Image (cartoon, rainbow, N blue to C red):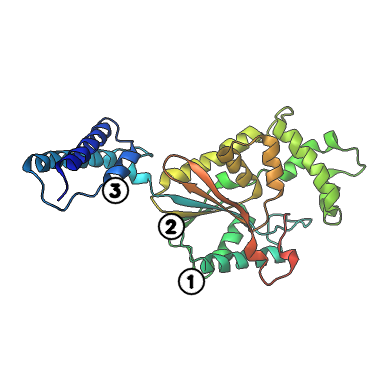
Amino acid sequence: MLSHKVLQSQVSSISTIAGSMMTNPRLEGHLLTMALIIIPAEPFENELYTTFQGIWAQFGRSLQEALSADLPSTIQRRSMSAIYLIRHGQASFGSANYDELSPIGRTQARLLGEALRAWELRFDMAYSGSMRRQHDTATLAFGAPDSSPLTADFRQHPAFNEFDHESLIRNHWRAVTDQDFAPEQMTKNRTDSRKSFQRIFEQIMGRWTSGRYPIPGEETWAAFNARVNAGLDDIIQRLEPSHNVAVFTSGGPIAAILKRVLRLSSDTTLRLNWRIANCSVTKLHYDGRGTHLAFFNNYAHLQVGGPENRVTYR
């Protein structure tokens, strides 16, 4: 039998915890502490038993209040959900229509689908931007309905569209280079001069993200970040505990989300953006109190038993 002194000590500790909970149902640590307390199985004095009953009833009322509260930080939202940010497969760089998957891009999407099934991932929600390369990546990855990792409807969400890089090139080309040919010519020939194009494009992106050179009718860097993160907030509002969500998007939106999650500068965000591989997977956790990075830019599924050229960045 537990001693009278030990029981009194337990009752005193539990009473303090329960009292704190009654005034602040957000104290999840107290809930955990209460849940871990083992009620003695041995009989003990009626006075202590009655006191213990009262405290436990107080705990129950506090728990019910916390569970019923419409607060993202209460217990009902404490189970972590996962948001998988997936960049589209390689687009048709240098072709007449950039917004379609290249043959390599289609292979990447199928390999991604094989990996999702091998990982035994099941998605409760799935989204893509409205761009063809994003939507087609999702369609190829999910595959046939009878073997798809998707357990719910697939929706398009334009918040996850990429910024208009073609427009940025046209608008800022002359400000960063004195090359003789026009941006349209560079677009046509850039398959053979990717390094040259990348250097110029990085300068254009730096100019755009600085916010110092606005162009009428052009989406600003600030507006782009606001659009993407409004889409993320919309998904978070729909999350249920332990849900898995897939978002098929582009490098720019993934970088913009990480800018928010990791509190990055615009310069660091751009450097991160250049390293996001086609059909790579970046995972976020949402625990009811915030969004956290679990892992970044996983493309191991493209490297297993295949040629190196299955890993691409443009």
10 Å crowding of disc 3: few (<14), some (14-19), many (20+)? few
Residue at (18%, 42%) from the top-left corner? 7
Amino acid bearing label 3: Leu
In the depicted structure, whether residue 306 falls above or below residue 54:
below
Q: Which residue is mark 1?
A: 147
Image quadrant in which you'd find residue 18: top left
Instruction: State the residue in front, 288 or 157.
Output: 288
In the depicted structure, whether residue 257 falls above or below residue 137:
above
10 Å crowding of disc 2: few (<14), some (14-19), many (20+)? some
On the image, the x and y values in percent for residue 107 come to: 66, 67
Mark 1, secondary structure of its residue:
helix
Q: Which residue is mark 3?
A: 36
**Residue furthest top in the image:** 212
Q: Please tell me how many numbered marks the rendered image carries.
A: 3
Image quadrant in which you'd find residue 27: top left
Q: Earlier in the sequence, mark 3 or mark 1?
A: 3
Q: Which residue is mark 2?
A: 124
Closer to viewer: mark 3 or mark 2: 3
Image quadrant in which you'd find residue 88: bottom right
Amino acid bearing label 1: Ser
Residue at (48%, 63%) from the top-left corner? 121
Where does the C terminus fall, quadrant-wise? bottom right
Q: Earlier in the sequence, mark 3 or mark 2?
A: 3
Residue at (27%, 43%) from the top-left corner? 34
Q: How far, Cα to Cα, is label 3 from label 1?
A: 41 Å
Mark 2, secondary structure of its residue:
loop
